[in-house]
Image (cartoon, helix red, strand yellow):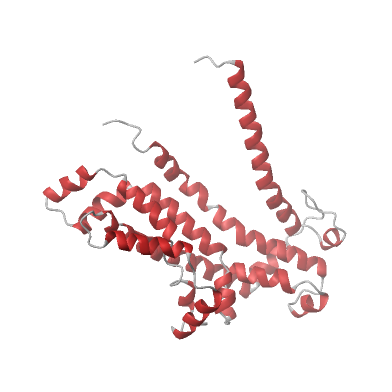
Amino acid sequence: MVYSKSSKIGDWVVVVFCALLILVCILPLLNVFSRSISSSTALIKNEVMLLPKGVTFEAYTNVLTDSKYTWSLGWTAILTVICTIISLTMTVLCSYPLIFANLKGRGVINTYIVLTMYFSAGTIPNYLLMKDLNLLNNPLVLIIPGCLSVFNMIILRSSFYGIPESLRESAELDGAGPIRILVSLYLPLSTPTLATLALFYAVGRWNGFSDALMYMKTREYFPIQLLLYNILNNLQSVEVATQEGFSNPGLSESIKAATVMFATVPILLVYPWLQRYFIAGVTLGAVKG
């Protein structure tokens, strides 16, 4: 295939734009990493930009040997896995029945579900609801309220709609029931969509801290993002830093940077693992049988 000169120029424009976009995403992370392994003196003097100064791993040693950081990181990982599994289950159970045309009240149910995307009770009514349900300071408050996203449900429902009804009718003629059709037909064909939604749920839970900030008081159940939030807000003065065990302000800065890395890198490692599902989603249906 012969490309014209204008096509080559357009390709280079796209390449340059993507390279700039990659730099915008990588440079802040590189700066944080450099700050996490730089010496306290360099941090106090604001000498650290993209490359570390006076390389030291004291901040990572302090984080890994401090039980509050390691427990918070482990608890957040457990919470993310549990929430992702429950959320995917709820999303499938909500979207699958709505694809059947003979479901009574399907239009009313769809309208009611969509309305929840546009109207919310607000922070105070939600807090009172959690209080009435005895969910305050309960780990379940981090799981149950956000176990279903209407937006993700609509995405999965649209994916189910894309599966030909002839396949379902063939399965029904073979004697398969609704559950068997879901497990053997719809879920395998919707694997790329499910993987994408799992990533959405996992990232949302891993990065979430506002619900724990409002509803949780026990420090033991603080997710890593809330712990990081408290560090960034509390270690602003030497007095508070001393109370937290950081008598060196420069070290407290490197501790904050190291904690940011611990809170960011694990969820970034999930993306390459799910990349093959995204590719499968793009090429799905491209091969004719």
Where 260 falls versus 211 (above or below)? Answer: above
**In the image, residue 157 lies at what x, y percent?**
34, 53
The part of the image, by quadrant, that contains residue 266 is: bottom right
Q: Is residue 165 left or right of residue 249?
A: left
**In the image, residue 278 lies at what x, y percent?**
44, 44
Where 94 falls versus 189 (above or below)? Answer: below
Residue in the image at 28% along x and 50% along y: 186
The quadrant in which the C terminus is found is: top left
Judge by depth and name the residue closer to the eye, 45 or 209: 209
Residue in the image at 82% along x and 55% along y: 54
Residue in the image at 53% along x and 73% along y: 122
Judge by depth and name the residue closer to the eye, 273 or 232: 232
The part of the image, by quadrant, that contains residue 47 is: bottom right
Q: Is residue 140 left or right of residue 47?
A: left
Where 283 falls versus 37 (above or below)? Answer: above
Residue in the image at 39% along x and 66% along y: 86
Q: Please give the count of numbered marks on the rendered protein.
A: 0
**In the image, residue 18 lies at what x, y percent?**
62, 37
**In the image, residue 139 lies at what x, y percent?**
48, 77
Please, which residue is most extreme toward the right here?
45
